Image (cartoon, rainbow, N blue to C red):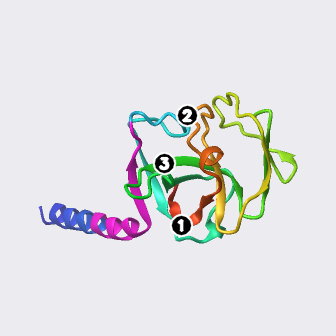
Amino acid sequence: MKILRYVHYLLVTAVFIAIAVVGSRCRLHHIPENEMAMQPALSPKTFRISRVFHGKKEELTRGVIVLFKDPGQLMEPKLCFSRVVAVEGDALAIVDSNVFVSGTKVDEPYVREKGNMGTIPEIIIPRGCVFVLNDHRPMNWDSRQFGPLPLRLIEGKIQ
């Protein structure tokens, strides 16, 4: 009986320590039922862990899914999910629904449906910003509408 009580005490203590350590660096997010923009990478009605973003550009690389405050609703920010396709200093262009970074066509095996993205002439991603696109491209609330995303609006990186 004493052994069970001791094991229980150790488990409870370990859980509290894990919550304290992980809670300061990670957050749990519910993927809303209507979140279709990042399927199949993020399935609706599931939970994903995000690592807190500390504003350091070195933390973000192409291909990472980020959680960010909707730039169009800064008074009551809604959180959105998108994939980073270009980082500061990159030359980005979209031609016939194909993404080019620094003149090289980006292989995007995660894209579910390209749809008609049209053409975006080459732009240089400004300092302190990234360019994000949804995996399900017809769901188009991403950098095609609001432009390069400031790092200050990014809340976390999805694990």
Kind of residue at badge 3: Cys
Residue occupied by mark 3: 80
Closer to the camera in the image, 131 or 110: 131
Q: Secondary structure at mark 3?
A: strand
Q: Which residue is mark 2?
A: 40
| Nearer the observer, 61 or 128 | 128
Sequence-earlier tag: 3 or 1: 3
User: Of the residues under marks 3 and 2, which one precedes in the sequence?
Assistant: 2
Q: Are marks 2 and 1 in contact (CB under 8 Å)?
A: no
Magenta-colored stretch includes residue 28: yes
Residue at 11 percent across and 61 percent down: it is 1
What residue is rendered at 43% in x and 62% in y? 26
State the extent of the magenta-drawn residues as a range: 15-32
Vertical comparison of 146 with 26: above or below: above
Identify the residue shown where x is 37% and y is 65%.
23
Three-letter amino acid code at disc 2?
Pro
Q: Is residue 91 left or right of residue 81?
A: right
Crowding at dot 2, Cα within 10 Å, few <14 / some 14-19 / many 20+, comes out as few
Which residue has dot 1 on it? 152
In percent of width and height, residue 51 lies at 49, 61
